[in-house]
Amino acid sequence: MSNTIMTVDDSASVRQMVSLTLKDAGYSVIEACDGKDALAKLSGQIDLIITDLNMPNMDGIELIKAVRATAGYKFVPIVMLTTESQAGKKEEGKSAGATGWIVKPFKPEQLVAVAKKLLR
């Protein structure tokens, strides 16, 4: 059975690109348009979450905090995929519980390599 990855981004084109990249690598993908949508879809086996930082309704930092407070998902790896690259934002993400940080635009092989590393 393949690993399931949730991708969370308010940009449909980014979600589609991330989703296609991961599906081509053999992963199952669940898409969510923001943090609230992601929490609503958080059920069953989710092995990795890849989330944007800046989103309406609930941003990536709030989502990470909510996931970390949810039993059963406390230790799921969460990677921020965002245009933000400032050290302060990275630190905020890390202290919220982010496992890693990828700056957009990303290379598909970079995304797959990170997923493989975290899902060993």
Image (cartoon, helix red, strand yellow):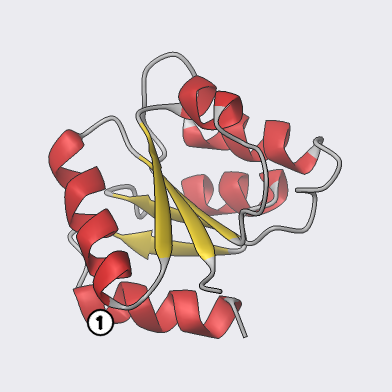
Query: Residue 76 at what x, y percent from top left?
Result: 69, 58
| The N terminus - image quarter | bottom right
Q: Is disc 1 placed on a helix, strand or loop?
A: helix
The residue nearer to you, when weighing 19 against 82, is: 19
On the picture, is 71 further left or further right than 103?
A: right
Q: Tell me where residue 45 appears, x and y as whole percent.
A: 66, 54
| Quarter containing the C terminus | bottom right
Q: Name the outermost residue toward the right.
A: 71
- Is any atom of residue 104 visible in this view? no
Q: Residue furthest front?
A: 1
Q: Residue furthest left?
A: 13
Q: Position of residue 81 (x, y in %)?
A: 37, 54
Disc 1 residue type? Glu
Residue beneath disc 1? 109
Give the residue drawn at x 27%, y 49%: 83
Lateral position of residue 104 relative to residue 51, left or right: left
Horizontal side of residue 101 vs 82, given as left or right: right
> Considering depth in this image, is 78 or 83 the residue closer to the camera?
78
User: Which residue is at a point 62% across and 36% down the rendered structure image?
Assistant: 42
